[in-house]
Image: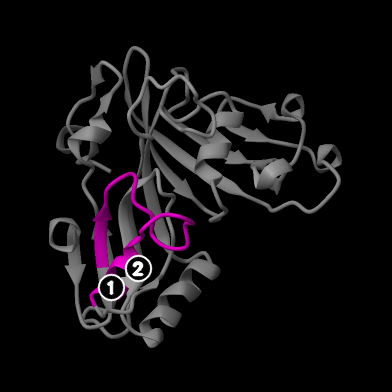
Amino acid sequence: MRQRCLLEEDAAILALNKPAGISVTGERHDTDIVELAADHGETLYPVHRIDKVTSGLVLLAKDLGAHGQLTRQFTKRTADKTYLAITASTGLPDHGSIELPLSVGRKNRVRIAAPRDRIVHTADSWQVDERDLLAGKNYPSRTEFTTVLRADEYTLLAVRPITGRRHQIRVHLAWIGHPIAGDPLFDRSGRYPRTHLHSWRLRLEAAWRTPGVLDLEAPPGPDFWTVGETTLTPAAEVLGGL
């Protein structure tokens, strides 16, 4: 899998274009990327994680020094990351922001930390008044998106999670009425063979490189562009200007 998925590698990092359905690390009962590397005598440290159902760019460090440099940028929210998402819906604005705190509910499920009917929607934003937050711990969360392509039943978005909470993009889009096609958290129809969320671009500082930056991009595969019985325009035609 490594050579087939390889995007970039140097002495400090390994960047892969992960297929949907493979875990990065820590999933019970699943073989994951870190475990597969360990089976071949290599130790990898995940810089970030994407869900098993999400395809695309995964960055791993080969040494702890690089790992520390890179993970600090995620902690400080200076890592510039963009996902692609296809929603099973239409009607989204050209640009939008979703600023809805998250909380963890029953069975460890991530949810919006407020009743759904208290979400305030203006033309291009979704938010909730602090007075309407549910009791208990909540986590401020912000997602921004740009609409890239509109189809009869679907919308392609370029999504920037400003914060990096667990399931943030998936929960934010579903709770505003625009769930990601094939997301098992919100769709039990079985209509889609995969979840149409893809980790697309990542830009970080990398002091050991010249120039000192990692600017990575993972092209989506054909399975991302085929949604139900619809095949969306290939990536090069719709993403070139972003």
Which residue is the extreme one toward the top? 152
184 to 54, vertically: above or below:
above
Taking the magenta stretch, the answer to whether it contains residue 32 is yes
Question: Where is mark 1, residue-wise?
Answer: 39
Q: Nearer the viewer, residue 214 or 114?
A: 114
101 to 74, vertically: above or below:
above
Q: Residue at x 79, y 38 (%)?
A: 129
Question: Where is mark 2, residue-wise?
Answer: 35
Other residues around mark 1 within 10 Å, as few (<14) / some (14–19) / many (≥20): few
Direction from residue 100 to residue 10 in the image, left or right:
left
Q: Amino acid at mark 1?
A: Asp
Which residue is the extreme one toward the left? 3
Q: Nearer the viewer, residue 241 or 197?
A: 197
Residue interval drawn in magenta: 15-40
Q: Position of residue 195 (x, y in %)?
A: 38, 35
Direction from residue 44 to residue 129 in the image, left or right:
right
Q: Position of residue 166 (x, y in %)?
A: 56, 52
Q: Residue at x 38, y 50 (%)?
A: 82
53 to 119, vertically: above or below:
below
Q: Position of residue 106 (x, y in %)?
A: 73, 42
Q: CA distance from mark 2 to mark 1?
A: 6 Å
Q: Amino acid at mark 2?
A: Glu
Callout 2–callout 1 Cβ contact below 8 Å: yes
Q: Nearer the viewer, residue 4 or 202?
A: 4
Q: Quadrant of the N terminus?
A: bottom left
Q: Secondary structure at mark 2?
A: helix
Q: Residue at x 55, y 30 (%)?
A: 174
Q: Secondary structure at mark 1?
A: helix
Other residues around mark 2 within 10 Å, as few (<14) / some (14–19) / many (≥20): some
118 to 48, vertically: above or below:
above
Quadrant for residue 42, please give it: bottom left
